[in-house]
Image (cartoon, rainbow, N blue to C red):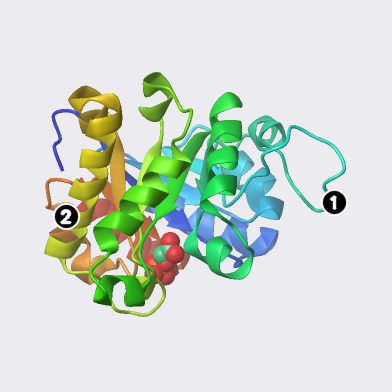
């Protein structure tokens, strides 16, 4: 990454794991382990029901809390949904938007990703916008087009000032939870493509300022190499974020 203009962000995506009591246990291990490691921002994106516990436990520490989804309307008859204002008031600072599991299993589209992103920004949350190609798309050599399209639609009607606040996570779908990681060169190449999409839309200053993470089977053994790449500014970590020692090792790799 370019340390002169960007700070790494290492974010755990706990997915549908950890009850509040398990959250207490994991964070009581993790918080002392990452204490004082200020070379990157450390975030845990937890299930909605764990936000309260996580916010209380991380108060005054260098660990920040995020959610894993947000609805785009402010309020109303949307049974089961959670608004950006609700997350904000609970103390969440980040929110994952457009994760491939939401796109695959819950009908998330580029258009609803855009709506959620704007709702998050309006409430003062930092969106972690996920983009990434399917294996079939990579095999057909349309990775650049897919990722560019997802990024452009997600940022429709988002100002340059707001775009700077967005974290983009490049997550090749074939690398998520599969143990199959993109090579550092592949990750750097696609993160670079995303940065060039941002440059075309907003100019080089904005593009250079935006944090672009890699996600997909990032773990202690491959984090340092991935994070050494110019365009890779951190990681969105699923499986390895559920173990304090593994997550800490990735935080260490980003120092
Ligand atoms: P993984 O998940 O690290 O378990 O591959 C990454 C993600 O889905 O964000």
Q: In the rendered image, is residue 121 in sight?
A: yes
Which residue is at the front of the view, 25 or 7? 7
x and y percent of residue 161 in the render? Answer: 39, 19
Disc number for residue 189: none
Which residue carries the number 1 mark?
79
Q: Please state if 154 lies on the left or on the right of 132 as rendered.
A: right
**Quadrant position of ligand 1:** bottom left
Q: Residue at x 23, y 32 (%)?
A: 199
* Neighbourhood count class around disc 2 (C-alpha, 10 Å): few under 14, some 14–19, many 20 upward: many
State the quadrant of the N terminus. Answer: top left
Which residue is at the front of the view, 180 or 198? 198
x and y percent of residue 88 in the render? Answer: 64, 32
Q: Residue at x 52, y 54 (%)?
A: 27
Q: Please state if 213 lies on the left or on the right of 52 as rendered.
A: left
Q: Is mark 1 within 8 Å of ligand 1?
A: no
Which residue is at the front of the view, 211 or 220? 211
Q: Please state if 57 lies on the left or on the right of 12 as rendered.
A: right
Q: Are marks 1 and 2 in contact (CB under 8 Å)?
A: no
Secondary structure beneath dot 2 equals helix
Disc number for residue 188: 2
Q: Residue at x 26, y 77 (%)?
A: 139
Q: Taking 131 as reference, is 70 above or below it?
A: above
x and y percent of residue 31 in the render? Answer: 45, 49
- Residue reaching furthest top? 161
* Neighbourhood count class around disc 1 (C-alpha, 10 Å): few under 14, some 14–19, many 20 upward: few
Q: Residue at x 18, y 47 (%)?
A: 192
x and y percent of residue 194 in the render? Answer: 26, 46
State the quadrant of the C terminus. Answer: top left
């Amino acid at each position: 990454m370019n340390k002169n203009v960007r700070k790494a962000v290492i974010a755990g995506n706990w997915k549908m794991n950890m009850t509040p009591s398990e959250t207490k246990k994991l964070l009581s291990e993790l918080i002392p382990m990452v204490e004082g490691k200020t070379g990157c921002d450390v975030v845990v994106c937890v299930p909605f029901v764990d936000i309260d516990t996580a916010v209380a436990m991380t108060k005054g520490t260098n660990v920040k809390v995020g959610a894993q989804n947000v609805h785009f309307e402010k309020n109303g008859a949307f049974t089961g949904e959670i608004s950006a204002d609700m997350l904000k008031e609970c103390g969440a600072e980040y929110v994952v938007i457009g994760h491939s599991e939401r796109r695959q299993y819950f009908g998330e589209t580029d258009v609803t990703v855009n709506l959620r992103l704007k709702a998050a920004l309006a409430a003062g949350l930092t969106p972690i916008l996920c983009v990434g190609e399917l294996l079939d798309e990579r095999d057909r050599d349309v990775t650049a087009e897919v990722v560019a399209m997802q990024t452009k639609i997600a940022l429709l009607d988002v100002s340059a000032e707001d775009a700077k606040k967005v974290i983009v996570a490049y997550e090749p779908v074939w690398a998520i939870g599969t143990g199959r990681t993109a090579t550092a060169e592949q990750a750097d190449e696609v993160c670079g493509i995303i940065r060039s999409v941002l440059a075309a839309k907003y100019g080089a200053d904005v593009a250079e300022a935006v944090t672009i993470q890699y996600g997909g089977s990032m773990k202690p053994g491959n984090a340092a190499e991935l994070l050494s790449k110019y365009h890779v500014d951190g990681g969105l970590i699923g499986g390895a974020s559920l173990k304090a020692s593994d997550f800490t090792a990735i935080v260490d790799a980003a120092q």
